[in-house]
């Protein structure tokens, strides 16, 4: 079925939909990972973004239960050069086209994804529309121009939970509620995770390090946190502009004075803003699994997976020390507080919980050190 992708600057591409008729819109970005499309689709950090994958063939290993990272998909569209209709993988439970169709995600193939990627790299991420219903390029360009900018748009409450839940070996389950949500069974240190749009990998890693986790909505009141008496606070990743969530900043600022804290992704950005930093939109966001980041103390460089379109500037804040820097553009990737047990990283790092550079490992070590004194 013929489909058109039109960008706000008038650039357009003709391809066809492999998921049926429809029309969707969002910010168009490119993602350089060679695999992992299932995790990308299910990561709330990609909410509202139409993702162009630079790998030439996508879908050859299908969809597996082991790669499920959320209860639903968040990308309105997936843009590929070629989609494999029949996967070859003994673990696959579904093909990529069927998976996208079932979740209402548009699949576009047959366009020159190299040309689209180069255009976005040169001119920056753009708003766009994909349609099989209206093939008038002029109309679609006007629609794209009329879309809201990602700057200033609060996407957190479109993806975040409304009620507390706990993480179990079977995944997330609603928290038992009395006057307070009840902690799950566990002997590890108790951590409240503020969910701004997390993917399940973070919760798995925190749990694997022995922490007892209670996950709460973005504006869960301070009075209830105090009543729960956690030993640490973790701010999750999420989508969009951190400056568009000002109601979270005063809460985070109060939490900083009471508990050891760590922030990841959007949570790291919100933590930095709450402590006096500033945020800004990157011309071309960091989306992929091949970004070099340097740990400033050791000089170690690691190749990281990233998924963010905004960056943090802490230069005005004397109490915050940069710990990690992006090699390509020198944007900040991590910080720690000089006096308080507070740290943040833009990316998760190290899917292996034994990796000492992982944010969850550094956070756990910080909790142990803080509570042993």
Image (cartoon, grey):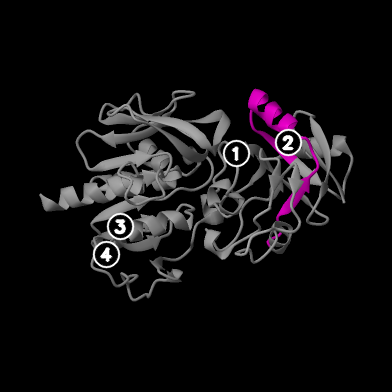
For the residue labelled by badge 2, is the local secondary structure a helix, a strand or a loop?
A: helix
For the residue labelled by badge 1, is the local secondary structure a helix, a strand or a loop?
A: loop
Q: In x, y percent, where is residue 110?
A: 81, 42
Q: Residue at horizontal 58%, vertical 41%?
A: 33
Q: In x, y percent, where is residue 82?
A: 76, 45
Asked whether the residues under the numbered discs 3 and 4 touch, taking CB atoms below 8 Å apart as contact, a structural biologist would say no
Asked whether the residues under the numbered discs 2 and 3 touch, taking CB atoms below 8 Å apart as contact, a structural biologist would say no
Residue 332 in the image: above or below residue 102: above
Give the quadrant of residue 265: top left
Residue 259, can we see it? no
- Disc 1 to disc 4, how far (Cα)? 35 Å
Q: Which residue is mark 1?
A: 150
- Disc 3 to disc 4, how far (Cα)? 21 Å
Q: Residue at horizontal 38%, vertical 55%?
A: 205
Going from N to C along the chain, the mark reached first, 1 or 2, is 2
Q: Which mark is residue 113?
A: 2
Is 185 covered by the magenta stretch? no
- Disc 4 to disc 2, how far (Cα)? 50 Å
For the residue labelled by badge 3, is the local secondary structure a helix, a strand or a loop?
A: loop
Asked whether the residues under the numbered discs 1 and 4 touch, taking CB atoms below 8 Å apart as contact, a structural biologist would say no
Q: Which mark is residue 228?
A: 4
Q: Which mark is residue 209?
A: 3
For the residue labelled by badge 4, is the local secondary structure a helix, a strand or a loop?
A: helix
Stretch of the chain drawn in magenta: 103-128
Going from N to C along the chain, the mark reached first, 1 or 4, is 1
- Disc 1 to disc 2, how far (Cα)? 22 Å
Is label 4 or label 2 in front? Answer: 2
Give the quadrant of residue 335: top left
Left of 236 or right of it: where is 232? Answer: left
Is 105 covered by the magenta stretch? yes
């Amino acid at each position: 079925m013929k489909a058109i992708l039109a960008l706000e600057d008038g650039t357009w591409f003709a391809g066809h939909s492999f998921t049926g008729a429809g029309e969707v819109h969002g910010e168009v970005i490119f993602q350089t990972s060679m695999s992992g499309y299932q995790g990308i689709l299910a990561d709330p950090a990609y909410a509202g973004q139409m993702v162009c994958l630079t790998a030439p063939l996508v879908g050859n290993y299908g969809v597996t239960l082991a790669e499920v990272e959320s209860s639903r998909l968040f990308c309105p569209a997936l843009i590929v050069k070629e989609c494999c209709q029949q996967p070859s993988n003994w673990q696959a439970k579904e093909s990529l086209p069927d998976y996208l169709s079932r979740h209402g995600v548009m699949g576009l193939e047959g366009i020159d994804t190299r040309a689209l990627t180069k255009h976005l790299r040169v001119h920056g991420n753009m708003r766009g529309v994909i349609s099989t219903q209206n093939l008038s390029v002029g109309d679609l360009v006007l629609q794209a121009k009329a879309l809201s900018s990602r700057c200033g748009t609060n996407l957190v409450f479109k993806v975040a939970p409304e009620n507390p839940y706990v993480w179990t070996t079977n995944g997330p389950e609603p928290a038992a509620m009395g006057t307070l949500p009840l902690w799950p069974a566990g002997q590890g240190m108790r951590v409240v995770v503020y969910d701004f749009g997390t993917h399940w990998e973070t919760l798995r890693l925190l749990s694997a390090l022995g922490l007892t986790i209670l996950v709460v909505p973005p504006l869960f009141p301070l009075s209830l946190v105090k009543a729960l008496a956690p030993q640490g606070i973790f701010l999750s990743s999420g989508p969009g502009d951190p400056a568009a969530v000002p109601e979270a900043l005063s809460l985070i600022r109060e939490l900083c004075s009471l508990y050891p804290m760590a922030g990841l992704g959007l949570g790291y950005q919100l933590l930095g803003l709450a402590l006096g930093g500033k945020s800004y939109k990157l011309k071309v966001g960091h989306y992929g699994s091949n970004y070099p980041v340097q740990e400033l103390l050791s000089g170690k460089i690691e190749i990281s997976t990233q998924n963010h379109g905004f960056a943090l500037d802490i230069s005005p804040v004397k109490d915050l020390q940069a710990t990690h820097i992006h090699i390509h553009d020198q944007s900040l990737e991590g910080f720690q507080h000089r006096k308080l047990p507070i740290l943040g990283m833009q990316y998760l790092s190290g899917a292996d919980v034994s990796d000492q550079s992982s944010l969850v490992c550094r956070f756990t070590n910080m909790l142990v050190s803080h509570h042993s004194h």
